[in-house]
Image (cartoon, coloured by chain):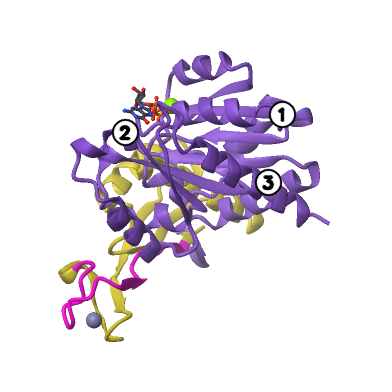
Amino acid sequence: MKDVRILEIRQSVFADNDRQAEALRAELREKGVFLLNLMSSPGAGKTTTLMRTIEALGEAFRIGVMEADIDSDVDARTIAQSGAKVIQLHTGGMCHLDAAMTRQGLEGLETGDVELAILENVGNLVCPAEFDTGASRNAMILSVPEGDDKPLKYPLMFSVCDVVLINKIDVLPYFDFDLEKCREYIRMRNPDARVIPICAKTGEGIDAWADWLRAEIRSWRGSMQ
Amino acid sequence: MHELGVVFHIMDSLEKVAEENEVTGISKVVLELGEVSTVIEDYLQNCWKWAARKRALFAEAELVVEKLPAVTWCDDCEKTYPTVAHGKICPYCGSPHTWLLQGNEFNIKEIEVY
Ligand SMILES: Nc1nc2c(ncn2[C@@H]2O[C@H](COP(=O)(O)OP(=O)(O)OP(=O)(O)O)[C@@H](O)[C@H]2O)c(=O)[nH]1
Ligand SMILES: [Mg+2]
Ligand SMILES: [Zn+2]
């Protein structure tokens, strides 16, 4: 007969990842690498927005991009055309990146000279919100065709974000997306989140986004001492 | 998909626990799952069975999931109500200014080891 005993664990399933994320965040701080975690549903416009972001900030910062994808390198090839450093991470079927995978990605990127690392997370509004990657800031993109009620349906995603980009505003006339209602729903979930409407396709609103990001990087650097 | 990732995370954490406690095998893992957590129990059980076959420590480990009820708080009338029955809108005053108090937990409660 086996000698059975009970071990009390009493910890969140995410506790282990949370610890690794905190450690990574602290290390990146030491190295002076600002990590932005970019999340959204599939097709909301992460890669297009990234291209615009590199255009706007590529002169000011050395940028490195990590493209997380379940199994392709389409996005990484797109980003490579911008001239930015880019690495493809295959998640092997996983629907999110955790802190350990992010760390591996950063090592692959050879962050020695990178000042702004951007992670394009897997397209998904549920899982990435549960797993802290160790990022300095979290951003998400909500695109107009998805509907203005998403903050109600995916509260966790909106509550972990520092900024919400509302993309594809060029198609607002064709959808019953109410921008003010959407702002209100986001505020209910996260009063501190900045909301910036953009059109990644034409570049509208990208200035405001780039200004926000630049200011965040500055204040992050300023709080280092 | 989410469930499989989560199962790997649980197993990784428990492998560390097993090492620290000189455990040779795990016969039962008890989780606490909030009623409105993003994890679906049936999927979780299936993923568990699949992953357990590949990791010696878990070969005989049964997964037990205890459900925790979801409760929402209304900011306007300051009452609580069961989330699943009423969703986001307060059944007492009709307000949408409501917050989940509990129900999205996902904890490893305890394990039975030998
Ligand atoms: N109309 C319109 N289309 C856009 C806009 N931004 C992106 N798109 C289009 O939306 C589609 C998806 O854009 P991506 O940038 O690839 O989206 P993504 O989030 O990176 O997609 P995944 O990586 O597959 O999840 C492409 O066809 C883009 O051209 C926009 O502002 N307006
Ligand atoms: Mg993409
Ligand atoms: Zn009420």
> Which residue lies at the image location 40% right of the left edge and 40% below the top edge?
A40
Same chain under badges 2 and 1? The reply is: yes
Q: Nearer the viewer, mark 2 or mark 3?
A: 2
Relative vertical location of residue B40 with respect to residue B53 in this rendering, above or below: below
Dot 3: few (<14), some (14–19), or many (≥20) neighbours within 10 Å?
Answer: many
Q: Earlier in the sequence, mark 2 or mark 3?
A: 2
Q: Nearer the viewer, residue B14 or A201?
A: A201
Q: Residues within 10 Å of mark 2 (few under 14, many from 20)?
A: some
- Residue in the image at 33% along x and 53% along y: A154
| Distance between the alpha carbons at the discs numbered 2 and 1 | 30 Å
Name the foreground residue: A145 vs A197.
A197
Cα–Cα gap, marks 1 and 3: 13 Å
Question: Which quadrant would residue A39 be assigned to in this image?
Answer: top left
Query: On the picture, is A125 further left or further right than A34?
Result: left
Query: Which secondary structure, mark 3?
Result: helix
| Residue to which mark 3 is pinned | A217
Residue nearest the observer in this picture, A1 or A54: A54
